[in-house]
Image: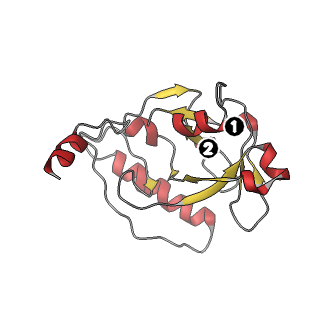
Amino acid sequence: MIRSMVALQHVDPGYKPDGVLTFLVPNFNGPTPEIRADFMQRLRTELAAIPGVQAVSSASPLPLDGTLANMPYGTEAAAADPTLFQQATVHNVQPGYFEAIGARVIEGRTFTEQENNPDARTVVVDRLLAARTFPGQSAIGKRLLMRIAGQNPVPLPPALQPFMVNT
């Protein structure tokens, strides 16, 4: 057990955890998406103004905290054959998240402020999901379907996804 613990301390998580401060914000359920977005933007602005802060963003759940939020996803083929849907762990993140944790972008780009709205269906995929879903190909410009609510798959626009980060 001790040997396993020591080995885990030397595993590269795909980001730089040194100097990263995390904390939980109670679930703020304002009456409208606009009020919730305004609250988060004000919080990010106020935190960024603290001396010594280099980057501010948010994620839910945090990486490696033991919380799993899975969502079914698939390629266009899964629309005709629902047995082709797979599960992936999903993290909801704000713009600047990957830069704040020092994650390396392998291909593509990360989120922009313009994509920070409830209607945006943008996604960043890690290299494992990209390799499993599009073996031997670039994942850039490929379309994914996700079952966000109910049984009907929601297509993600290929112009906005996927992006890859090193995890």
- On residue 15, the disc is none
Query: In the displayed structure, does residue 114 sit left or right of residue 99?
Result: right
Relative side of 106 to 102, left or right: right
Place residue 149 in its image quadrant.
bottom right
Is 70 on the left-hand or right-hand side of 51? right
Residue 123, label in figure: 2
Rendered view: 58 above or below 26: above
Q: Nearer the viewer, residue 96 or 66?
A: 66
Residue for badge 1: 160
Residue 155 place in picture, x, y as percent:
77, 49
Residue sitting at x 42%, y 35%? 99
* Other residues around mark 1 within 10 Å, as few (<14) / some (14–19) / many (≥20): many
Q: Where does residue 76 sit, x and y in percent of width and height?
A: 80, 44
Closer to the chain start, of discs 1 and 2, is 2
Amino acid, disc 2: Val
Q: Residue at x 46, y 60 (%)?
A: 68
In whole angstroms, how far apart are the C-alphas of marks 1 and 2?
8 Å
Figure quadrant of residue 147: bottom right
In the image, residue 22 sits, relative to residue 101, either above or below, namely below
Q: Residue at x 48, y 58 (%)?
A: 40
Residue 102 in percent (x, y) is at: 37, 34
- Residue at 62% from the left image edge and 70% from the top image edge: 32
